[in-house]
Amino acid sequence: MASRPPTLKRKVLTARHEPEPVAYGQGRGGRPWRRLRDQILKRDGYLCQCVACKARPVPRVAHEVDHVRPVAEGGTDDPVNLQAINRDCHKAKTQAEALRGRKR
Ligand SMILES: [Zn+2]
């Protein structure tokens, strides 16, 4: 009996794209952050603490919590480095920070 040629079986090794594990507890979105965020919002009376709002007669309502000194610039999650901030103010501040980061 003639031996059969080795089968050229194609290996089924399709790379599965596993979803990236969500890093809970680190940075935004984690439960510890949410608790801290609520604490800061309460502390600041749910009012935006940004420079622009402090100069206003009536500050905007805060929806978010912002790092006074950005994490990218060495800021921490310490409550002294956190302030309640309005969504739109936050957007403007983050944009300014990104621009600053790009220049460096
Ligand atoms: Zn503001």
Image (tube, rainbow, N blue to C red):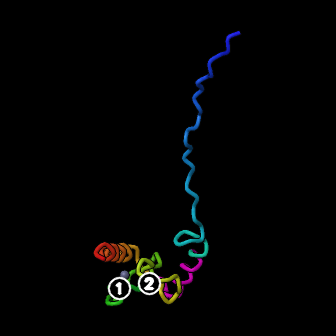
Vertical side of 17 occupied by 42: above or below: below
Mark 1, ligand 1, within 8 Å: the answer is yes
Q: How many numbered discs?
A: 2
Secondary structure under badge 2? loop
- Residues packed near mark 1 inside 10 Å, few (<14), some (14 to 19) or many (20 plus): some
- Residue 83, position in %: x, y? 46, 84
List the single residue furthest toward the top.
1
Residue at the disc numbered 2: 47
Would residue 74 be found to the left or right of residue 38 on screen? left
- Residue 81, position in %: x, y? 47, 86
List the single residue furthest toward the left.
103
Residue at the disc numbered 1: 53
Vertical side of 29 occupied by 6: above or below: above
Quadrant into which the C terminus falls: bottom left
Please say if the residues under marks 2 and 1 sit with CB atoms less than 8 Å apart.
Answer: yes
Residue at the spot x=54%, y=47% of the render?
Answer: 17
- Residue 7, position in %: x, y? 62, 22
Mark nearer the N terminus (2 vs 1): 2
Q: Where residue 66 is drawn, which disc sits there? A: none
State yes or no: residue 43 in magenta.
yes
Magenta span of residues: 34-46
Secondary structure under badge 1? helix
- Residues packed near mark 2 inside 10 Å, few (<14), some (14 to 19) or many (20 plus): many
Residue type at mark 1 is: Cys
In which of the image's four quarters is ligand 1 placed?
Answer: bottom left
List the single residue furthest toward the front.
2
